[in-house]
Amino acid sequence: MKSKLALLALLAVSAVTHAQDADKAPALSKERAAELQASERLLKADSQVSKTGQVTIKGKSVPYKVTAGTQPVWDKDGKVTASLFYTYYQRTDVSDKSKRPLVLSFNGGPGSASVWMHIAYTGPKVLNLDAEGYPVQPYGVKDNPHSILDVADIVYIDPVNTGFSRILDGKADRARFFGVNADIQYLAEWVSTFVSREGRWTSPKYLIGESYGTTRVAGLALELQNAQWMYLNGVVLVSPTELGLKRDGVVDDALKVPYYAATAWYQKVLPADLQARDLKDLLPEVEAFTTDELLPALAKGGFLDPQKRAQIAAKIARYSGLSQEYVLQNNLSVQPQQFWKELLRKQGKTVGRLDSRYLGIDKTESGDKVDYNAELTSWLHSFTPAINQYLRNDLGYKTDIKYNLFGDVHPWDFKNENTGENLRLAMAANPYLKVMIQSGYYDGACTYFDAKYTMWQLDPSGKMKDRLRFEGYRSGHMMYLRSEDLATSNDDLRDFIRSSTPAPNAPAKY
């Protein structure tokens, strides 16, 4: 606290000194004033820079304006407490914005910036990667021929302490920002202000979130309705979390097996007859085994008949690429950390957590945990230099503030996490609202079958299942890094936006 007060005092003295010097010196140019602001590493509460560009999408030229800026977060008394950085893309050859869809994009963590989907998925710029998503030099971005900017405007939002976003009031309570429900509440207020400033109240509106961002947007769907009176057309959950829908114990253990099968298939360690089949032909068989045989077996625990236990272990081994002995040693419940270490142990390799196509090398081949996440280190190669170059140099947003790919948002309050139920209630109250889930088969953090389970449990009544959609891809957590899936997943988004925009004068009613 003392160091914070000392810093505030120093800044106050600095401000006075600048004021006194201003009386003696010529007026500063806007450029020089901006340089001084940056040199003090202070975030402007309200700022923006804009540029124009164009990108060819689906063979057609799409002109756009991109704005990088900050917008304040106010407390209940109207005092600025923080500011969020955003990047906003608008197609410029559209005469009537009132009917043009608006997509509000969030990433996860919690504590992760919006960089991932911004420059790798839906925006007009994507990372310079190879076809499978591995980093290549020179680092940077290139045009994205698959962007959804042809059908919707997009704003990428960095929550507090991610990207350039920061708390500005040193006395502000961190608990107001860093928790499941606190995060949802202040972001709903921010979104409402943004929509008002940009004149987008009549636009069809969509939320897209990735990983923990799915928790965020699931909760925002109801909060925007209840607190801001803003109704959405769609919510997209990319690599979703559990959304507070419980699946502890044997359910949680069982749901991982289809992911194990997908990974083993990709790494070519399945029995020859399974390996010869296409992945999408194989997975339904593994899913049926998981729900129809494995779950009941795990439920019996140590009282499962020994012969049945051996049969179940043999099937798990067959589908997962692990040995039957190893499966039995772990009581039919091999955990992900063990799987990432064990699957390719004989080859001296580990597989990535967020994307099991990526391989790592540990100090020793023994043990139950990998030394590092092979996929994340690969991604940081690409994203860190690219986003800094793009925002600071290409868009001209000048600041000495560090762009936090991962920011300090801890401790995070996870209590009272009911976002799945919140999303269900938002859908029930808004007949227009539809939901799409996108998952990569090789994601070991938020597995695709767990995502299917989330979809099944989201509406136990089944009355809204025709408004729920699942799409799977042959990649991992960020399925869009693979060029083939970048095209397919954006096409699915494009179709979802078009199909969930109601016909003119179609009433929202049951």
Image (spheres, helix red, strand yellow):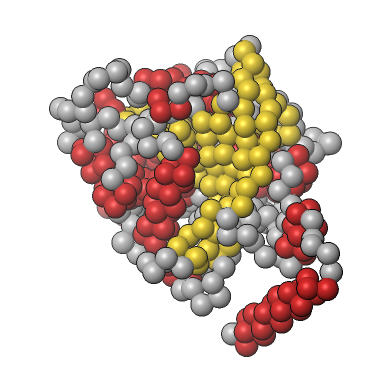
Q: Quadrant of residue 442?
A: top right
Instruction: Residue at 61%, 20% (x, y): give it.
Output: 62
Where is 192 relative to 177, above or below? above
Which image quarter is the N terminus in? bottom right
Between 142 and 196, which is closer to the camera in this rendering? Answer: 196
Q: Is residue 49 left or right of residue 296?
A: right
Where is 459 relative to 300, above or below? above
Residue extending farthest to the top is: 59
Answer yes or no: is residue 340 visible: no
Where is 456 relative to 228, above or below? above
Between 81 and 216, which is closer to the camera in this rendering? Answer: 81
Where is 479 relative to 365, above or below? above
Please provide percent x and percent y for residue 475. Answer: 57, 31
Answer yes or no: is residue 468 visible: yes
Q: Is residue 201 left or right of residue 329?
A: left
Please provide percent x and percent y for residue 406. Answer: 61, 56
Q: Quadrant of residue 204?
A: top left
Between 328 and 256, which is closer to the camera in this rendering? Answer: 256
Residue extending farthest to the left is: 510
Please provide percent x and percent y for residue 449. Answer: 41, 36
Q: Quadrant of residue 468?
A: top left
Q: Is residue 492 left or right of residue 47?
A: left
Between 7 and 474, which is closer to the camera in this rendering? Answer: 7
Which image quarter is the C terminus in? top left
Instruction: Residue at 48%, 60% (x, y): give it.
Output: 73
Q: Is residue 486 left or right of residue 325?
A: right
Instruction: Residue at 30%, 33% (x, y): give it.
Output: 433
Instruction: Residue at 62%, 32% (x, y): give it.
Output: 65
Report the number of discs. 0
Please provide percent x and percent y for residue 396. Answer: 74, 44
